[in-house]
Image (cartoon, rainbow, N blue to C red):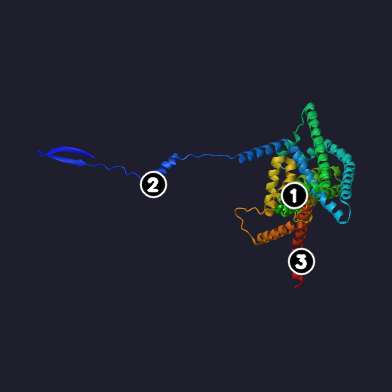
Amino acid sequence: MNREVHTKDGVGVVTTATRPLAVSPPLPERRAFADEKARVVRFEVSPGTMIQLILVVACMWLLIRLWPVFLVLVVALLIVGTMSPAVSWMEARRVKRGLGIALVFTLLFVVATLAVSLTIPALVAQASALIEQEPAFRARLAGYLAQSNLTAPLAGWLLNVKYDAPVSAIGATAFAVSMRVFEIIAYGVSAIFLALYIMIDRDRLRGGLFAAVPRSHHIRLARVMLNLETIVGAYIRGQMITGLLIAVFSFVLLVACGVPNAMAIAVFAGVADVLPYIGAFLSIGPMVLASLARGPVVVVVVLLIMLAYEEFESRVLVPRIYGRALRLPSSVVLFALLAGGMLMGILGALLALPVAATVMMLIQELRVDLPGQQEQVADVEQRVGDERAEEEYERRTEGVPAEQAAAIAVEMSDDRRKEENRGPEAADVSDSID
């Protein structure tokens, strides 16, 4: 408040001017503002959280250091999943498990030995012949390309390709490749023996796994293990069957067309066929190039017949051989192949599909709630069935050791899966009768 004094016509006049004061907030708001200014954010980590974090870091470090050993374990589990159905089939016909395992692995060893002894010498000879004939193949292909103005620059590039690597570099590369091949063979043999030990000690290992899991989750764990065996076994057996079929078909076709080095090209086609999508191009490409020596008619015949076979394989053979084991959409298949190839190369591309199928199966079996998914009637029925099965399992395994409890859980899960598989068929039969 200010006071001003001035005169007007000799008379003193006092004028008072008042300035507006800032309005202070009410008392509760002032206290809240003061509390907000004085608030301190503290991050307190409990000892349990620190221990868990240390364990996670240690596990990641061990996984990185022992990555080859982990891959050997994965390959061994793939072998176990592939061979287990044959051993179980023998057990169902009253063959002892040890004898069944011995028979299966002996048969596998005999077949592998015969395949190697019959194919490797001819394969090496024909591969050497292909390398020697590579300049002639390249010149012939460049001649076909030079006939068109559009592909003439490519023909000139093919003719000017020079292999001027020094002999020392070639020797070093060959030595490195041979050591890598020896390492892969050693890891493969280790995986085979590890798979044999896992199959022999199946009951004890399974009992230890079930002992580490609460009994309320044993039924679900048994179903997950059965689904894993189905996925892995179906995938590996499917890859072996489709690769063998395309190798035999390619060999017969190339021999009938008089194409040289038919066995080497057919074996390469069978190996390349394990890669979805790109395997077809890797299989057909060498056949077309090798057919150039027989003229354009043979090239067109080989190309059309192999394209027809690839279509037949994708439309007929793959659905029948793989069945519903993987159940992967095409987009998931392509993404899994790209991710696996980028992370681990060819081995990653081979393992991408069973890993993706396993992840989707775990999401479904463990009933992981996804953000955009709503609970369906089938989910409710499955949950109710799981609860009843768990109650029955608790009753049947009261006071039973872990190994016997694991066997009971697997038996109950197998029986339930058989009933679920028979359900649609029984419904179809009743509908047809009606």
Locate residue 19: give its quadrant.
Answer: top left
For marks 1 and 2, the one nearer the N-term is 2
Q: Is residue 33 left or right of residue 310?
A: left
Q: 86 and 343: which one is in front?
A: 86
Eye-nearest disc, 1 or 3: 1
Label 1, label 2: how many angstroms apart (C-alpha)?
Answer: 60 Å
Q: Quadrant of the N terminus?
A: top left
Q: Are marks 2 and 3 in contact (CB under 8 Å)?
A: no
User: At label 3, which amino acid type do we have?
Assistant: Ala
Residue 114, position in %: x, y? 90, 44
Q: How far, Cα to Cα, is label 2 from label 3?
A: 73 Å
- Per the rendering, the mark at residue 28 is 2
Type of the residue with mark 1: Phe
Q: Nearer the viewer, residue 231 or 33?
A: 33
How crowded pointer 1 is (Cα within 10 Å; few <14, some 14-19, many 20+) is rated as many
Q: Is residue 297 visible?
A: no
Q: Which mark is residue 210?
A: 1
Q: Nearer the viewer, mark 2 or mark 3?
A: 2
Pointer 2 or 3: first along the chain:
2
| Secondary structure found at label 2 | helix
Disc 1 and disc 2 in contact, CB within 8 angstroms: no
- x and y, in percent, of residue 126 in the image: 86, 39
Q: Nearer the viewer, residue 172 or 383?
A: 383
| Image quadrant containing the C terminus | bottom right
Left or right: where 292 falls relative to 12: right
- Disc 3 secondary structure class: helix
The reply to whether the C-beta atoms of the residues labelled 1 and 3 are less than 8 Å apart is: no
Residue 53: horizontal and vertical position, in percent? 63, 39
Q: Which residue is mark 3?
A: 426
